[in-house]
Amino acid sequence: MGDKKGLLLDTTLCIGCGACYEACKERNQLPRTATHFLEDRLSDQTYTVVKRRGGRFVRQLCMHCEVPTCVSVCPVGALEKTAMGPVIYHEARCIGCRYCMLACPFGIPKYEWRKILPRVRKCDLCADRLAAGRPTACAEVCPTGATRFGDRQALIEEARARIRAHPQKYVPRIYGLEEVGGTSVLLLSDVPFERLGYRTDLLSEPLPLLTWQVLQKIPNFVVVGSVLLGGIWWITNRRREVQLRERQQRELREPSAPESADSWHEEP
Amino acid sequence: MTRWSFRRPSFWQLVFAVILGAGLYSTVVRFTGGLGASTALSDAFPWGLWVGFDVLCGVALAAGGFTLSAVVYIFNIERFRPIIRPTILTAFLGYVLVIVALLFDLGRPYRIWHPLVMWNPHSVMFEVAWCVMLYTTVLALEFSPMVFERLRLERPLRILHALTVPLVILGVILSTLHQSSLGSLYLIVPEKLHPLWYSPLLPIFFFISAIALGCAMTIFESFLSYRAFRKRLEIDLLSDLGKVIVVTLAVYLVLKVQDLAGRGVLSRVLEPTYEGRMFLAEMLLGVIGPILLLSLRRIRTDHFGLFVSAVLVVLGFIMNRLNVSITGMEASSGVSYFPSWTELSVTLMIVALGFALFGAAAKYLPVFPETERLLASSLVEPPAVAVLRRPWIGTTPLVLILGGLFFIGAMGSAYSGLQHRERTLAAVSTREESEPQIAEGLKHLEVPPDVTFPQGEASPGPVIFRHASHLNWERPDCTICHHEPFRLLKASGSAASSPARDLHDERHCGRCHDGRTSFSVKEDCTACHRP
Ligand code: SF4
Ligand code: SF4
Ligand code: SF4
């Protein structure tokens, strides 16, 4: 657990300077997509934005869920949750079904709609920098500590401590502690989270459980189903054979018109 | 052939050619311009018509095939044997067309085989992919006897014959999995799909409605192929299918009501909202209407009555799948989606190809049982009960009136739903954007240390740049300088990448020190250069 990294975003500390936005663009070598960063939105060329919401500045980026919906829905395993926390994308596997985009509860993955060979794009929590023991680019440049990088567990303690120190200021809740099973990106705020554009009606269980409940029954279904159908066939077929034999015997006694011509698998 | 029946195909051929032409053009647009240029899809709405109609509805075409082959081969109910072939053919075509549609929809169609070797059993889409591959194979094998028979190839026929029962069992299992898994796809979006459609029972609803659709398609095709080739199925078989539809839809209706009530959203069905009205339309058209029509013996034993009921089932079914995939997802996505003409024309082309292939197969392959015999039997009037009492109204007008009522009712409901659409969508997308307070953060603000620029050759003195004096302390915004002019926000955090060229120019200090925003670089040198 100690190895799991994360970010703590404290909206009360954010001054909306846009340094994180620029640092992200720089690190990922993304082109400019807006005249002013506050007017930009997430896209295939923008992995994080700072928004003006509810009288605060608030960042938006991939939450790097603990049990990521996007990873579970990808049919070819093109998305992966790494041990250190980042959810990363293996471009060479992706078939472009866009199920990850449909399924992500935070609406994060974006698609290169304009390209002939499009990729899914999103924040990867600077996985390469993390592996090298460095913080994310956005956390490194934040001048106020509104974006803090660290061990997820330590950040949770820190967030708890901040709430304890200023109980009248903060909304008594760490966003991302339980949402869809927890996320690597955690938020603190002094205004209700829904006013910041963060959904508070998400389930607290990981969403992949919803489909896994059904999927895990498949092997059983196949085995039981085949045996059952085979059994039914065995019984009904036996009955039919008996009937056929009886009919043949009857026909031997009194020959009648031939049977229907349309059946294509008539027993010989 | 009469003149009329001679001219009709040429009209349809014309329509077909137009559809094909438009579709091919769109195909070129799709594969040269990408998905963005050819579809109305967006980041907020990644699945549209190609998934909602082509895939979700195309797969369901196969439901008739597996239901009836189970009935005939597993349960050995021989009466239905003549229906098997058209349903298998429909199923096979359905799957082939689904694969074609997928090639359009996938961002990287040439990687369609990836799920074969790259596994993720936690993904419903993975299950879907395997079902498509395996069941298409099974269907091809089940379909092939028609071809072999036609070619009089005895050996493969015998082999396939021996394999029939295992194949059918495999097919039933796969198909059950597949129909339901399309519903399971949406289990993962509880907070996105509107509660009228999101339900833990989605897989079951998809499965049941697919069976009803499969039976309805069989009736529908029998009617069409009679008009085209004078080949069709016996009325008593079709009317039994009608019964199956009634029972299936009734089960569906009961489950649906229970489910809605159980989740406490039953009242929302009647609310005058976009979703409520569309839901009502779908239920009237595809469930309640057909149940009522087909419960009437007169309608169920009449070719035209069966046909109209089947059309209602098919339309209602399509509406259901579109509602799940589009209507129900629109509000949460915050955008409105309407397919582009490219999406529409490709879809039309795929449907037209389906009809054409079915027609060709019905014409050249032994799909429908021997014609003469069936014609003879269809000349026999439906059971006497209908004729005994003189009906107060002819069957055809009755069908038209009832069917028309439900159709108009549903369309009216859908129309009123569309009236609410704008409002529903607008309500979601209005997001508060008040002026932000710059809270606590300023107290914590740490500006980077001063930067001393080394003295140049002709320079009157070195320049010390102070962040603190270049910041608007009321509203700090680093990106005024740090996006283009000074790309200082290096990942390393060092100032190493500072511009080596003339700092006076309009890309650097000169950008603001231009005499308007601030004093000009051309004025007093010692304002910056301290000797
Ligand atoms: S926020 Fe979305 S994209 Fe990011 S890890 Fe979670 S599910 Fe995946
Ligand atoms: S679009 Fe790519 S990454 Fe996303 S679910 Fe499909 S295959 Fe996986
Ligand atoms: S760098 Fe820090 S203070 Fe500036 S916008 Fe980003 S989070 Fe807010």
Image (cartoon, coloured by chain):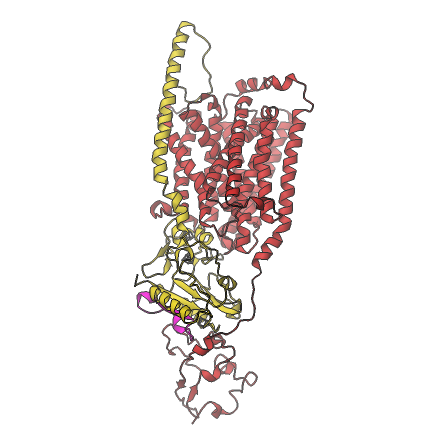
Eyeballing the image, is A142 above or below B408? below
Residue A263: image location, x then y, percent: 45, 21
Residue A268 seen in this snapshot: no
The residue under the point 49% across, 79% down is B507
Residue at 45%, 78% in the rendered image: B443
Is B375 rendered above or below residue A10?
Answer: above
| Residue A168 position in % (x across, y down) | 46, 70
Quick check: is B376 in the magenta stretch? no
**In the rendered image, what is the letter of the chain coloured red?**
B
Q: Can you tell which quarter of the image residue B222 is in?
A: top right
Left or right of residue B411: residue A13:
left
Image quadrant occupied by the C terminus of chain B? bottom left
In what quadrant does ligand 1 lie?
Answer: bottom left
Q: Which chain is yellow?
A: A
Q: Which residues are magenta?
A: A129-150
Which of these two is toward me, B58 or B99?
B58
Q: Which sits in the foreground, B356 or B107?
A: B107
Q: Is residue A135 magenta?
A: yes
**Residue B292 image point, x, y percent:** 60, 31
The residue lying furthest to the top in this view is A253
Classify the position of the N terminus of chain B by image quarter.
top right
Q: Position of residue B114 (x, y in %)?
A: 37, 47
